[in-house]
Amino acid sequence: MRPEEQPSAPSRQWRAGSSFTMTTVGVLCRSFLYGLCKTETNGLHRFLELLDDRENVGERQRGLITVSNHVSVLDDPLIWGVLPFRYMHNPDNMRWGLGSYDLCFMNKGLSTFFSLGQVLPTHRIRHSEFGGLFQPTITQAIRLLSRGPFINSNGPPEKPDTSLSSPDVSDPFASGHLTFSTNGRDTFPAPSAYLSRRHSWIHIFPEGKVHQKEDRTMRYFKWGVSRLILESDPCPDVVPMWIEGPEQIMHEARAFPRFIPRPFNNVSITFGEKLDVERAFGDLRERWKQLRAKEEDARGAKLQVGVLNESLKYSDEAVALRKECTMRVRAAVLDVRRTRGLPDEDPKAGLAETYTAEGRRGEGKKDDGSLVRDT
């Protein structure tokens, strides 16, 4: 497809459907938060100013990542009910999230709903061979944060390629110019293929699971957030957040009917200061660029944005960079947690090894008293 033929945005019908979905869900969430709960926000005015600065897609200079703790199955979309109505009808300036493939994309109806609601299909490694840090959806997220659009310059193939079976698809655009595949067989709209999605906003829960504990400590953070920060071009803005209250609305110990949210609870959403990303991550990104350039020189060709070779996935230096970046993100969220008057966590709480104390694997109540649920 020639650049002049590339649509700058999805079809009018898709945009209308997405706007309707985002607005309807947003109104329901806002009505619940402010009509049936006592909700407070901290730092929201700063965050709305940031969204206002990003409203014109053509003037955006970088993407946006918001990152927070994860306390209930309703965290997203419920927490975005604190945004005023005027933000909800503009999907191009609303968040993209990561949703579990086996929960949110089980059939065509759910898949359509969550795709219109700007949720990317994400395989969970405990439930799918296609899960993990290097799945195509993470590539999509990196490209959404970057300066797109990203398309297959050869245009769509005559028919979809269903021959791929590897859980590590090298490039999501292998089978089409406006779609991507999470496993080499399915097909989803590729949001990063459109100019209107350039430098988008992505929200991520790095704990990867709902974690409810009386002292409000967090689980260790998984490394996906580090890929978004290290590999996006340029480095996205990062806003850490802290949420309290949704765990009472959808507590993991709730009795029948479990699917009904419990009203009349206190909810607090705190938006931290936008990080100085050059100061917070500049040294790590420079090391990553050097490592990537070394690999590209060795292979004699540039790697596409979000696509990695084996060395960039698994070498000791690449792993060390992801670990350090993830711990810095966690520290930023802890800074916001501290503003809520909570005591500092035990430093060991951020280590994966600590969670052997949880006891048995899987969901439910753990030996350390926490309640955990896969999302």
Image: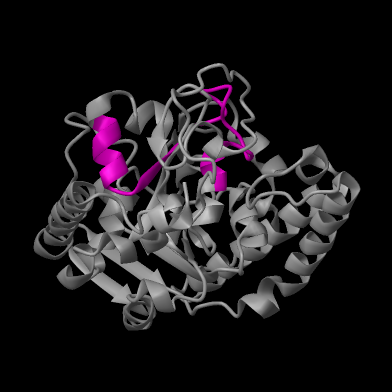
The number of discs equals: 0
Residue at image x 64%, y 55%?
226
Q: Position of residue 180 (x, y in %)?
A: 47, 37
The quarter in which the C terminus is drawn is top left
Residue at image x 28%, y 52%?
77
Q: Is residue 157 visible?
A: yes
Q: Left or right: where does residue 250 sit relative to residue 189? A: left
Residue at image x 26%, y 72%?
40
Q: Is residue 23 above or below residue 274?
A: above
Q: Position of residue 149 (x, y in %)?
A: 48, 57
Q: Is residue 360 above or below residue 28?
A: above
Q: Is residue 359 above or below residue 21?
A: above
Q: Is residue 153 magenta?
A: no
The residue lying toward the viewer, choosing from 25 and 7, is: 7
In magenta, the rendered stretch is 110-139
Q: Is residue 217 visible?
A: no
Residue at image x 60%, y 38%?
171
Q: Position of residue 152 (x, y in %)?
A: 53, 44
Q: Left or right: where does residue 339 sit relative to residue 252? A: right
Q: Is residue 125 magenta?
A: yes
The residue lying toward the viewer, choosing from 70 and 183, is: 183
Q: Is residue 63 above or below residue 374?
A: below
Q: Position of residue 221 (x, y in %)?
A: 60, 50
Specify the color scheme. one colour
The residue lying toward the viewer, choosing from 62 and 180, is: 180
Q: Left or right: where does residue 322 sit relative to residue 108? A: right
Residue projecting furthest to the right:
298
**Quarter where residue 136 is shown:** top right
